Image (spheres, rainbow, N blue to C red):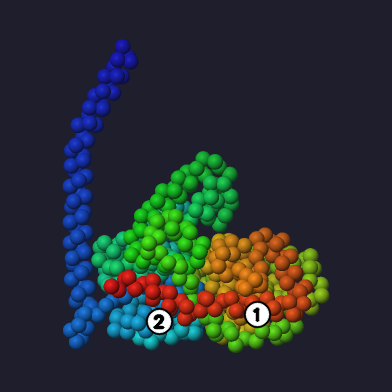
Amino acid sequence: MADGERSWYLCKLLRFFYSLFFPGLIVCGTLCVCLVIVLWGIRLLLQRKKKLVSTSKNGKNQMVIAFFHPYCNAGGGGERVLWCALRALQKKYPEAVYVVYTGDVNVSGQQILEGAFRRFNIRLIHPVQFVFLRKRYLVEDSLYPHFTLLGQSLGSIFLGWEALMQCVPDVYIDSMGYAFTLPLFKYIGGCQVGSYVHYPTISTDMLSVVKNQNIGFNNAAFITRNPFLSKVKLIYYYLFAFIYGLVGSCSDVVMVNSSWTLNHILSLWKVGNCTNIVYPPCDVQTFLDIPLHEKKMTPGHLLVSVGQFRPEKNHPLQIRAFAKLLNKKMVESSPSLKLVLIGGCRNKDDELRVNQLRGLSEDLGVQEYVEFKINIPFDELKKYLSEATIGLHTMWNEHFGIGVVECMAAGTIILAHNSGGPKLDIVVPHEGDITGFLAESEEDYAETIAHILSMSAEKRLQIRKSARASVSRFSDQEFEVTFLSSVEKLFK
């Protein structure tokens, strides 16, 4: 009897839900239609606004080209791409209006341009308008201790909306990796959209790290120890990767900075017909006046690291490997060694990271031999590279590695991580000769540094010459040619 009653109630419940199905479908359909109408109305209003703004004083329409780069005042390789891309476009399209969306509200546009010249030796030939965004905090990783990728991506949509409401461009280029802004500018703003991808927001390597329950800077230990949490995070990553692929496929033109990034973007975005490798511009010409001789400006050997103080750069590995080198006295014949970490700090989190690195140096007892140089001018960077014997790089799966190229062009012997762009594109043989070294663990780095320092001056000179000859393909001139060729489709 009880079973019969349960079956009767179940049938009534199913009938009730079934009776709601078609009304619910109608309501959902109506809401979707209303949403489409509202978005279409917003698009029309934005198009009207764009026509008013793009009309110049002589009555002709001027093309508006905008770059989305919320951290344009930072001093990393991504910012060098931004300024070189702007300079290249200004040469080809001098009549256009150029806009940069930035969240650097604490500085003026003139100060940003002066910083670009000071850090990268780049001066633009035409004016640039800066649209200052107040909601940049929405893409700060510190705001999302959990579900960081999703939080930052959703935050970028709101930041992109703020940008679109202030200026509607004809051509929109995301030069910092905020793919979730692409459909916003394409379908609501009616823009031609392009993207320059330095590093995919999520990659198949990140999926492997979670799947194999490996500890990493983006995979906490408490998750790796719990099989259930690992499975939940893996599902979350797969869903995010699917959505990331959808928004990325909205791009009319896709540029990637290395073979490693290309492989991941092709597997995620699946837009091979409009995707090209455009190696980032490295100011190799500026470093070619540094003489290729055994460095004698310091009594011993100088090791330098060039890169922003971000967690994925893995600066602790450099300090630990350096400490291991000193503790094991692998280079007893060398009078002295010094490690100089050169990089930019974007925010308070990066500054805190530098303080933690200083603390690590003290804990390992090598603080006397480790220096930190933060946001230094270009001339000072060049001076350190001219004096260095070895250039260090320790980021796992670095998308490209402009700092690696600069070290090689300056004549330092590079020791980079055995992965990503350095492995596939940069530290590769040139005409059969080696151009540098690769390593992975602390022990690998310490032993390879000792090996390099134990070489004869003649052998080191030969490697320097091969490395310098190999980096011409990463010059500013090569970047301009490949970049302009790739974005040509956006201007037709």
Report the side of 137 relative to 14 (left or right). right
Label whose residue precedes the other's in the sequence (1 or 2): 2
Residue found 48% across the figure and 71% down from its top: 279
Looking at this rendering, what residue extends furthest in the top direction?
1
Relative to the observer, which residue lies in front, 477 or 37?
A: 477
Residue nearest the viewer, comparing 143 with 30: 30
Residue 265 placement (x, y as % from top left): 44, 59
Helix, strand or loop under label 2: helix
- Residue 28 % position (x, y): 21, 45
Disc 2 target residue: 87
* Quadrant containing the N terminus in the rendered view: top left
Q: Residues within 10 Å of mark 2 (few under 14, many from 20)?
A: some
Residue 379 picture location, percent across and down: 56, 85
Please report the residue visible at 22 percent of the width from the left and 35 percent of the height from the top: 21
User: Looking at the image, is mark 1 or mark 2 nearer the viewer?
Assistant: 1
Residue 480 picture location, percent across and down: 43, 78
Residue 158 in view: no
Residue at point 69% right, 78% down?
A: 462
Image position of 387 (left or right of 398): right
Q: Quadrant of the C terminus?
A: bottom left
**Residue at the spot of label 1:** 465
Q: Quadrant of residue 443?
A: bottom right
Residue type at the position of mark 1: Lys
- How far apart are labels 1 and 2 at the CA level? 30 Å
In front of the other: 127 or 481: 481
Visible in this render: residue 297?
yes
Report the side of 421 relative to 65 (left or right).
Answer: right
- In this view, 294 is above or below 266: below
Three-letter code, disc 2? Arg
Residue 360 occupies which quadrant of the picture? bottom right
Q: Secondary structure at mark 1?
A: helix
